[in-house]
Amino acid sequence: MGKLLNMNFPTAALFLSIIWNQSFLCCAFTSQGRLPTPRKISSSQLYIIGPMIRKMREEQARKNMPMASEQEREGEAPGLRVGSGAWRWPPVWPYSDTDFIPKEDIIEPKAAPVTGILAGNLPKPDEIEEEKKETLDVLKYWGEEKAGIKTEIDPDAVKKLKEHYAFYLRDGMSVLELGAAEDSYLPDGLKLSRHVGVGADKSLMGQNSALTESFVVNLNDVIEEQGVNSDELRALGADTFDAILMANTIDFLTSPREVFRSAWALLKPGGIMIVPFTNKEAYSSKFERAQTKMWRDMNDDQHMWICGSFFQFSASDGWEKLKGFDISPEGAKKEEGIMSALSAKKGMNMYVVQATKASVDEVVDPNDPEKSFRSKMWLLPTLEERDKQLLAPRLARVYKTMSDEKLTEAILKNVENLPKIYESLIKMDQFAFTFGMQAQLATDLITDPSFNGKDEQILALKMGLGLRKPSTEFWEPIGQKTASMSPEDKVNLLAHIVPRFGSNDPSQEAALNEFVAGLDPTFGVIRSKCPNMTESDVQLIGTEILAAEILQPGRSTKKEYATWLCSLTEHELTEMVAKRKSYKEKAVSDMKAMQEERKAEAARIEEQRQKMIAQQKKAREERSMVFNPETGRMEEIKKK
């Protein structure tokens, strides 16, 4: 018994399993099929096992506790488990390429021949033949192999789903259903103005009397980072539907972000997308071949978080009021693992994750420009959420310093060019080019009215970053002559130069050539006047004044520039350097101040929310009267 008391948890769990099944072991091998006499469990064994089960149940109960305030639950359908403020997301898309592929379609990398490795001859990756697999043909699978096979959700789960829909759907709404089949599970008596079904099995949709129209679409056929590749879906138009439903479909999506982006575009501002799903074993015996690896590997709690992440990483803050519900019937099984085996409960669990579409700011809100710029970036491809979080405050800061209305309009229009910029910048992740530097360069470029994302400008950016072989007449000499500048200052120089390309203006082309030709003479004059100035400062102030006077046509002729430069004193030049550096320090200080303001505001809002929750709780505890719906009167609460 001493050994038993020293068991660790996994060993104890195994011991429990053995005891639990002791009376059922080896029944097939008893004489005449008689059951063996079951062993009695001693009181000392129960003393150990009982607390362990109790602890496991307590942990499961804590896990199932809702992460939503009383205030949030009061305004929502029953079963709210995850409130809007409870979600936490990583800064970038957290999944691998194989998470959203059926397990049978995953190609494992083929190992190099062992004999070659032992001989020291390692083959190149492209020399190793890849195994070829026949991947799932979605339309053939659903439209032919599984044609007519119904999902068959259990009646109690259907009842709960109908009740949930009844809380949010209203007569006269226009509804789009993605993954439509034989039943939409709509509340009885609901009269929609339009109900479009989009699915993969035409015969099943034909059995659904709720649909006013339907067509077949492969939701896994997408244009990367844009949306579902379907002319029929696009023809429905933007901002069209009051609600989008997608029941028991999420587990089959191989490109979920694109599907959610299409849904966002199709919804009206303020419209709701409701995504119900069951526990993963609900119909795996029928459709497991089409379920993604993620769905088959993860549990139900993880599924809810993952579904929420599809909203977040498809349109970010473009989705509001993101909430998760557990609307499982009373008798549904909640436990997992060992506790699942011990539970006598049966039935199908049902979960819902939903959010509403926010409105894009058509013009910049002067009181909150950061929010406006974030809304402009919700659906931009290529950029990670991390990049958008870095860009929005920088763009807001530049906006606040501008008084020219045409310049602010140019910034708004240029936001759509950010993906072109980031297609180059993301390749700099492997170098000492921080995400903050990338965001600053992108901000500087799109806030320059001369930048329009032309091919010549993007090519210039790539050469300047070293992603393309630099031109011998321009980028190569610039790189050599500015070698002592800091990376941050080189980023600033790039922002000066890149927008000058692609203008088709002969005078601008001449100015670019004069800029390169003027570097050595400019640096030489500054060195002669400021012998104690560091080389990095010489190159910094030299490129700055040359860019300001020569790079933009019409500012100064070469003769005027040379005369002005030679007239500058050492004091004036050192003052220029100090002033230039102070701008950088102020920008950093302003950015920190803005971030602190945002944190303080978020803390203030949270404090107010907690006070309101406490007040509501106190009011409920202290109230002596309550409305009785049966009598239609206020009645005194009977104290227990």
Image (cartoon, rainbow, N blue to C red):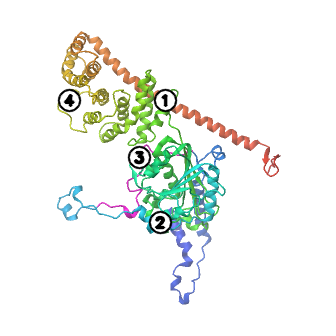
Q: What stretch of residues is rendered in magenta?
A: 84-109
Horizontal and vertical percent position of residue 44: 60, 69
Q: Depth-wise, is mark 3 or mark 4 nearer the camera? A: 3
102 inside magenta stretch:
yes
- From the image, tell me which residue sits under label 2: 287
Question: Magenta stretch mostly in which secondary structure?
Answer: loop
Mark 2–mark 3 Cα distance, whole angstroms, equals 28 Å
Q: What's the CA distance linking mark 1 and mark 3?
A: 24 Å
Q: Quadrant of residue 326?
A: bottom right
Mark 2 or mark 4, which has the lower sequence index? 2
Element type at mark 2: helix
Which secondary structure, mark 1? loop
Distance of mark 3 from mark 4, alpha carbons? 36 Å
Given residues 86 and 407, the one toward you in this image is 407
Q: Which mark is residue 364?
A: 1
Q: Residue at the spot x=59%, y=82% of the render?
A: 37
- Counting residues from the start of the chain, the first of labels 2 and 3 encountered is 3
- Circles 1 and 3 in contact, beta carbons < 8 Å: no
Label of residue 445 in the image:
none
Q: Earlier in the sequence, mark 3 or mark 4?
A: 3
Relative image position of residue 425 (x, y in whole percent) = 32, 38
- Tell me the number on the disc at residue 226: 3
Q: Nearer the viewer, residue 402 or 347?
A: 402
Residue at the spot of label 4: 474
Location of residue 19 with respect to 423 vertically, above or below: below
- Report the amino acid beneath label 3: Gln
